[in-house]
Amino acid sequence: MASQALIKDFEQFLGPENVFSSEVDRHTYSFDAAVLRPVVPAFVIRPTNVEQLGECVTRLYREGVPMTIRGSGTNLSGGTIPDKTDTVVILTNGLNRILEINSNDLYAVVEPGVVTADLANAVAAKNLFYPPDPGSMAVSTIAGNIAENAGGLRGLKYGVTKDYVMGVEFFDATGALVKTGSRTVKCVTGYNLAGMLVQSEGTLGIISKAILKLVPPPKASKAMMAVFDDVQSAAEAVAGIIAAHILPCTLEFLDNNTIVRVDDFTKIGLPRDAGAILLIEVDGHPAQVADDAVAVEKVLKECRAREVHVAKDAAEKTQIWEARRQALPVLARVKPTTVLEDATVPRSQIPAMMKAINEIAGKYRLDVGTFGHAGDGNLHPTFLCDKRDKEEFARVEQAVDEMFDVAIKLGGTLSGEHGIGTAKAKWMEKETSRGTILFSQRLRRALDPKGLLNNTKLVGI
Amino acid sequence: MKDLKQLATRLMELDDRLAACMKCGNCQAVCPMFGATHMEGDVARGKIVLIENLAHEVLRDPKAVAEKLSRCLLCGSCQAGCPSGVKNMEIFMEAREIVYTYLGLSVVKKMIFRILLAKPKFFNFSMRVGAPASRMFFWSSKDEQKTTHSPLLKGIIGDRHIRRVPVKPLHATVGDLDEPRIGGGVKVCFFPGCMGDKFYVDMAKACLKVFKHHNVAVYLSSKFACCGIPAVSSGDGEGMVMELKKNLDLLKGKDFDYIVTPCGSCTDTIRDWWPKYAERIDASAADFFRKLSAKAMDINAFLVNVVGVEPAEPRAGATTVTYHDSCHLKKGLGISKEPRALIQANPDYKLVEMKEADRCCGCGGSFTLYHYDLSRQIGQRKRNNIVASGAKVASAGCPACMMQMEDVLSHNGDSVLVKHPVEIYAESLK
Ligand SMILES: Cc1cc2nc3c(=O)[nH]c(=O)nc-3n(C[C@H](O)[C@H](O)[C@H](O)COP(=O)(O)OP(=O)(O)OC[C@H]3O[C@@H](n4cnc5c(N)ncnc54)[C@H](O)[C@@H]3O)c2cc1C
Ligand code: SF4
Ligand code: SF4
Ligand code: SF4
């Protein structure tokens, strides 16, 4: 149990309004968006400036208190669930200032707790573009995005969070400030520690500032929807589009289960017998967009698309995207518990992966709907269940295990964007190697000798 | 701890609905409370976890959970945006009733909801005596909104800037109405709501003026009790049932096509909560209120969709007005176009949109009574958006929102007036 003295100490330092130690408050920081067992922390602190953040880490390290840093707690792998009941949770939402948006040099400097959508909007207001767009961007934080290397719908053309991190400042486990990267496009001063902090899931350091790359926004875009009888043809179309040297900004996929469920719920008249739908958007210079749209349409037809709808205006574009927007909400309503996975395979293996997912779901008598980022091979098989039904949930866990096995065999990965946390830690070695685990653990121990930062996450310490 | 077990058992009735929350955290983006405090315990998923943990006996502090549950505007923003379709409003209302009943309703709340609101005669009497007397206690805030504040009563009402209570409430001015249909036309039951009857009397009169202009016959009782939402949201289901019984007597056997209110919260309550609570009276009451529920209509929607009022082009130099989407109107009833159309029907006004028009204003009915500081803090964001729009008038289809906007605008010394869309439209009628 946390010593009362330590709580008092932090109350004095941060103000009582920034230290939450009541039983009810502690319970509200025991979970995140992952379907995992909650752990109630000792107490929760909220620094409101970066100096305070560093001082908090220093004090906790000195006292040997385990720490979990929490942004908005939307990660799907348990990265912000406290490791133990004596863990102190450090919140970043008191550090949510956008420090600079530089239109000349195309970068932004932000504090760790800035909400992704707030940054994207502020940047758009200056006629610039911050492309990473995780589905949770209305609430997720920039440091959470960096620490998970969050992706999104625009990954295929624009890349993911790591492609926009020019530099970070962070506190190491002992509270020492580390600066890496810069406001310049090129910078080779020292190790690429910023790169190391990307997808570090709160285990290597506590990000206190980030410098992010911005790009000019595309001038035009065009959206279309293509309907296929089977997943195979859709996958061929995806490969065909890329072989034609076109990089759509989004290339999304819905499987038959998802189509039927979305149509049940929204009655927007989707083709219920279709094997798959692809939703495609190309963007860029208007002339380029027009050319690309024609080329994509041609590939789609060659790949046996049964129907192709091209949005004529903004309203039609919104309508086309409605099916994709509704995918998760509709699936989430079917059953109480939604296990949202993100097994990812090379694009060409999508049909094999889809076949395996549906066979596994059949074998374990489970309901699954799959949608995702076809352009990246990043699928979101979504298992619909009720975690209160222990027997059913055990089947879900077996199915997920088996699914990862297939993903790895197909040359894919456990997680395209949702992270490892504790949810997938046991799979790490299978995808990588024993050496990888040992190397990572040695790295952690060297940087965090007392093993205090999110110590059960990823490879453990 | 036998009692805690009982409390847990009762809360388990909510378990299926609680389990629907996938803890995605999306509600953080829209929750006005979270916007003010950034605490998980103030956002829907945090409250759901607390109710769950109390139900599953992982947590044994109902008083602390009750305090968290009270830190909520019941604005429904979380429910409207929830990808998982969690029925947050039902969950919060029912959990409040279960937990508050277990703890015992405070004496003050009981007095308000069971005596004042359920016995309109008593309430009306106190208002009649109270309103003229209030002039001695309430001093003018010397602002454009003509609000008053009361340094003497600060301990009770805080530093609120509110309109002077009219000397005569609506029911004392117009009494009972039961007009015959005009040429076989439409007839409505006009339910002014407590705020319309006692506080925004001019607004309620504007509604009557508009009905008259459009040959809409009106049924109005001077004895209507409160719609009951303040009672339910304070966990007093019994109080709601008492008010409902009173209203049942006044509504049964009356001839009208719609029951129309100028308050989004009243309409929402009549539509969604009356049938539910009527089940506690008896089967025939439940049946009556189920049928009545289908006739509940917001006044903006009624005037635009039934009467057919149409927007006009604003004339040159028209007064700018910005519209705030009240939560219960937009998120509860899905009404956002109609009030705008009604405002636009008066060519002397030009509608300009504010940022975050549908973000809660921070009033939340009884929330503002218990958490005035938070309410003001949330209201400040609304005020900033109103002022940034440059509009001279701010409009909302809910008297509670009007009161909240007047309070924050007055505190900031802004020269923006607050009007109901019906008042704006009525100004265009001779
Ligand atoms: C409905 C839904 C949709 C989603 N869609 C996507 C998607 O499309 N793409 C995607 O990639 N992800 C998605 N996610 C997952 C999640 O939103 C992302 O991982 C996001 O980046 C997490 O941000 P956060 O602020 O909530 O971080 P948190 O969940 O609070 O934290 C995530 C990790 O980052 C660490 N961390 C937080 N702040 C810091 C810091 N200052 N320094 C160091 N480490 C830190 C934490 O310790 C934790 O390990 C989705 C989640 C949900 C619920
Ligand atoms: S948005 Fe809905 S499902 Fe998500 S956390 Fe909030 S209440 Fe739960
Ligand atoms: S009802 Fe409103 S205040 Fe209450 S939790 Fe939901 S969004 Fe927040
Ligand atoms: S007063 Fe209006 S905006 Fe505020 S909570 Fe109530 S309905 Fe919503």
Image (cartoon, coloured by chain):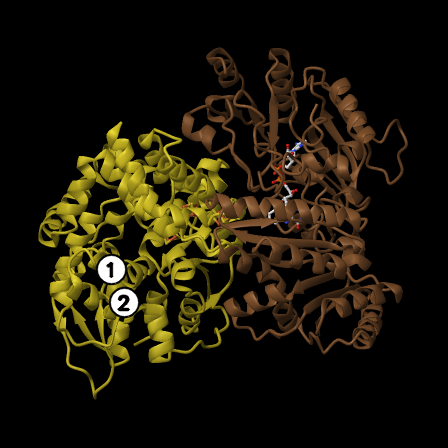
**Chain letter of disc 2 in the image:** B
As drawn, the chain in yellow is B
Q: Quadrant of residue B11?
A: top left
* Residue at the image position 82 percent from the left and 76 percent from the top: A302
Q: Which image quadrant: the N terminus of chain B?
A: top left
Q: Quadrant of residue A269?
A: bottom right
* Residue at the image position 40 percent from the left and 31 percent from the top: B58
Residue in the foreground of this view, choosing between A101 and B14: B14
* A298 displayed left or right of A385: right
The type of residue carrying mark 1 is: Trp
Q: Which residue is tagged 1?
A: B274
Q: Quadrant of residue B108?
A: top left
Query: Eyeballing the image, is B234 above or below A69?
Result: below
Q: Is residue A99 visible?
A: no
Q: Which image quadrant: the C terminus of chain B?
A: bottom left
Query: Eyeballing the image, is B300 above or below A386?
Result: below
Residue in the foreground of this view, choosing between A318 and B403: A318
The type of residue carrying mark 2 is: Ser
Q: Give how far across and how far down residue A20 sits, in percent.
A: 47, 26
* A172 displayed left or right of B164: right
* Residue at the image position 71 percent from the left and 67 percent from the top: A278
* A394 displayed left or right of A461: left
Query: Eyeballing the image, is B259 above or below B70?
Result: below
As drawn, the chain in brown is A
Q: Which residue is tagged 2?
A: B293
Q: Give how far across and how far down residue A375 sits, in percent.
A: 77, 59
Disc 1 to disc 2, C-alpha distance: 7 Å
Whether tag 1 and tag 2 are in contact, CB under 8 A, the answer is yes
Q: Give how far across and how far down residue A137 sits, in percent.
A: 63, 48
Q: Give how far across and how far down residue A390 sits, in percent.
A: 49, 43
Q: Badge 2 local density, few (<14 within 10 Å), some, or many (20+)? A: many
Residue in the foreground of this view, choosing between A247 and A51: A247
